[in-house]
Structures are given as C-alpha cells and as structure tokens.
Amino acid sequence: MGTRPPLRTRSHRALGALTMALLTVAMPASPLPAWSEEPRVGVVAMLLGTATVTRAAQPAPALLRFKDAVFLRDRIVTGERSAVRVLLGGKATVTARERSILTITEVPAMSTVFLAAGRSAVAVSKAGMKPGETLEIKTPNAVAAIRGTFVVAEISPARSTITILRGLVEVTKLDPTTGRPVGPAVKVGAFQRVTVTDTGPIPAPVAITPETAKNLASDFTFLPKDAPADSVAPVTRAATAASIADVTHALSGSTTAVSGGAVTGATTPIGGSIQTIPTNPTPPTSPTTLCDPTTLTGGGIPPIPTGPVTNPVPNAVSPRPLPRQ
C-alpha cells in the first residue's frame, strides 16, 4: 500500500491545476490566420457581439471578425447576445443567432450548412445557383434541400423545427446516430412549419400565422435593442425602414425578395436591403450613407432609404432583444 503524498504537496498540485484551468478560461481566443488549406466559401458580412471559428489550420478557437474569409469546414460558434451573417459566394446568406454552432461543407453540386445547435436562417437565390446545384441545411436529425427559398432552422434537444418563410422545400428525417435518411421526405411550403423529433415519423406541416411569420422574420432582420450602441447607432433608422419594407413585401404574397435577382455583396435576402453592420464601424460623415457588403466587391455605398414607410410591421420596427440566459 503506497504512502500518500503530504497534504502540502497535494494542495500545491490542486492549486497548480486550478491556476492552469483559470488561465485557460481567461486567455482570449487566438488571432485568426488569414489562410486555410480548405477552399474559401464565403465572407463575414455582418457581426454583432462575438463569434469564434475553429479550422484545420487553427485548432484553437479564434475570434471571427467583420470581413473575415470563411473556409470549407470552418466551425463557427456565436456567443451570448451575438449574431453573425455569412455571405456564401453569390448564392446565399447564412445568419446565425446567439449560442449557435454551424459548419459549412461541400461536395460537387451540393453545399451543406450543418447547424449543430441554436438558430439559423438560410436565404438562397435561385438566380445565383448553377444548374444542378443545391444547398441544404442540416440538423442532427433532419435535412432540408433549399433552392430559392428562405428557411429558418431551430435546434433544441432531440428536436429540430424547420420553418419556411419563402419557397418550397423537402424535409427528410435523419437517424441522429448514423445520419442516414429515415422515411419519406415531407414537402413544406411558405408559411409552414414542421418539427422533427428523434422518435416517430415527420408529422404533417403546420401553418403559421402572419403574425408568427413577422415575429420570426424580425428575429433575423436585425437590429436587437440591447446590442452594443456603437455597433448599431449609425444605421438603426435605415436598417429598420428597410426591414419593414422587406417583411411587408414578403407577407403581401410575393415569392421574390425585395432585393430581387442574384445574391451579391450588395444584397442580404433575409432582410432585403438590410446592410452590413460592422462591430466597430466608423461613424458616417452624413446620415445618408451606411456600410454595405458592396465594399467587399468594389461597389458603392447606397443611400439610406428616406421618406415615410407604408404598412409598417410593428415587430420589425421594434426588433426583439436577444434573450439572456
């Protein structure tokens, strides 16, 4: 039977372990390298709060910043009271809310946005897709092939809720253990929702009310009330007006985003004309300009929409704050 080390030695070891743990927690995320062995698939078009990314060239989580490149198989995690929007080439935007985990993968003719936790909206422009190309949003127990649609996915334990705000998709249940399809696909149309659980088949889609659609759209047409003031003050009025116009237009029965055409650096289909919001923007010299993703592609900065807004949407005028838990 061995001799136990002196109490002082054990205390020193415990203190050392505690110190290392505290240092690990307190250390900031590593700087993000500007390169990766994987191909580039997108760019950070908007960032509120904090988000980190883990990639093959940088195993430790690194802070994600506005205009950072996004590479294949990057694992993006959003923090509390945070949100990130990624522009995927000219075909889609992916917006993740707080406490979300997503990864973008790709095989020939198929791009996949895997949402492991949280809430995410994917807006796809059919005009920006190549013939035969498809984008899908995948959760631990479901997958939806989307093309020219606006889809919101929400993850909770053993449950995935897929809501369609524009277009038509087919949702297929996946075995949460193997990831293989289980049973037939279910078609879900605009203003419909389906909830997939780990047990049982996919139920029939359930219709959502216009008010529910407005509320959900406002969740992904920023700006949250309690976001840091310096990140939203210069563009709050313009973004709110644009979101009202876009959501109202969508609810009127149109199947085309207000922005129209292909998704480019100048458009964000989730909010139509909602513009890019950097975490620390330079205050504009005039209230008639704001930051826009066109700066990423050499385009100009468009003017802020002016004049009265018709048919206002209350929930878009006062976006709900990001929840705190």
Image: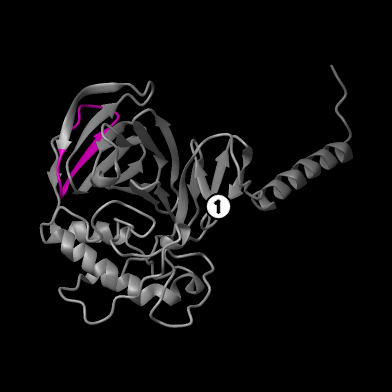
Residue drawn at (48%, 70%) of the image? 231
Q: Nearer the viewer, residue 217 or 157?
A: 217
Q: Nearer the viewer, residue 40 or 157?
A: 40
Residue 216 place in picture, x, y as percent: 26, 56
Left or right of residue 261, residue 54 in this image: right
Are there few (<14), some (14-19), or many (20+) residues within 10 Å of tag 1?
many
Is residue 192 a member of the stretch shown in magenta?
yes
Residue drawn at (47%, 53%) of the image? 44
Q: Amino acid at mark 1?
A: Leu
Read off the residue under disc 1: 64
Instruction: Indicate the quadrant where residue 157 lies.
Output: top left
Task: Name the quadrant of the C terminus.
Answer: bottom left
Residue 318 place in picture, x, y as percent: 30, 72
Left or right of residue 163, residue 57 in this image: right
Is residue 302 a member of the stretch shown in magenta?
no
Instruction: Indicate the quadrant where residue 160 lies.
Output: top left
Query: Looking at the image, how many numbered discs can be counted on the residues?
Result: 1
Residue drawn at (24%, 44%) of the image? 126
Residue 272 place in picture, x, y as percent: 28, 61
Colour approach in the figure? one colour
Residue 82 visible here: no
Q: Find the magenta span and give its range.
A: 188-202
Left or right of residue 156, residue 74 in this image: right
Task: Name the quadrant of the N terminus.
Answer: top right
